[in-house]
Amino acid sequence: MTGQTEPVRIALNKPRIGTGLSVEQALAKRRSSRTFFERTVQLDEVGQLLWAAQGITGHFDKRTAPSAGVLHQMMLTVVAAGVDGLPAGLYRYHAESHDLALLSDGGHREQLRSAANQQEAIGLSTASMAAFDDEQMAAAAHLDAGHHALYMMPVGYA
């Protein structure tokens, strides 16, 4: 990406709204795991997760996740490795255009795992979405000055 003025943008498919699965059913099926299969995640699945976390749902920039007066929107960063249709790299999600902007290409999982106190799941996951070292995490996720990572979510198949 050296020398580029505009980041590479990756368009995401329109999010699915009516899946037929109720909130109660989704909660009943939800499970966490620390064991991951060597299976890739589809770009559509990453796009759906990003929309569910911070997507636009209506007029005046209303989001899937609330904030008082729409003043404190989260910035989502994706570290991709093993995502079908998405080269390995660090991406920023843009809810307004429902796309990803490439911040830095190549593998970043080990740098993130180090910032996340060597959590094994971070190194195994195919996509990590940004208890860790704040300064290391900000550097690893290419956060703007004054921004802090709140949470990292490893995504993959268990």
Image (spheres, grey):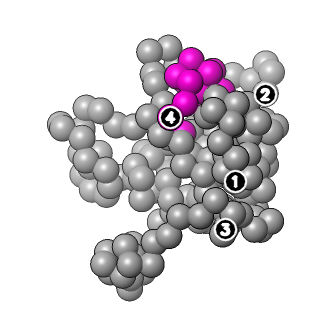
Q: What residue would you read off at disc 4?
A: 131
CA gap, disc 4 and disc 2: 31 Å
Whether pointer 3 and pointer 2 mark residues with C-beta atoms closer than 8 Å, the reply is no
Q: Which mark is residue 1?
A: 2
- On the image, the x and y values in percent for residue 148 come to 46, 24
Residue pictured at 78% horizontal, 56% vertical: 82
CA gap, disc 4 and disc 3: 23 Å
Label 4: how many Cα within 10 Å (few below 14, some 14–19, many 20+): few
Q: Nearer the viewer, residue 19 or 4?
A: 19
State whether residue 24 is above or below residue 82. below
Describe the element under mark 4 as helix, strand or loop: loop
Q: Which mark is residue 157?
A: 3
First in sequence, mark 4 or 3: give its number: 4
- On the image, the x and y values in percent for residue 18 come to 38, 79
Does residue 55 appear to the left or right of 85 in the view shown?
Answer: left
First in sequence, mark 1 or 3: give its number: 1
Q: Depth-wise, is mark 4 or mark 3 nearer the camera?
A: 4
Whether pointer 2 and pointer 1 mark residues with C-beta atoms closer than 8 Å, the reply is no
CA gap, disc 1 and disc 3: 8 Å
The N terminus - image quarter: top right
- Total marks in image: 4
Describe the element under mark 2 as helix, strand or loop: loop
Q: Which mark is residue 125?
A: 1
State whether residue 113 is above or below residue 44. above
Q: Depth-wise, is mark 4 or mark 2 nearer the camera?
A: 4
User: What amino acid is at disc 4?
Assistant: Ala
Residue pictured at 32% horizontal, 55% vertical: 64
Q: Nearer the viewer, residue 128 or 53?
A: 128
Describe the element under mark 3 as helix, strand or loop: loop
User: What amino acid is at disc 2?
Assistant: Met
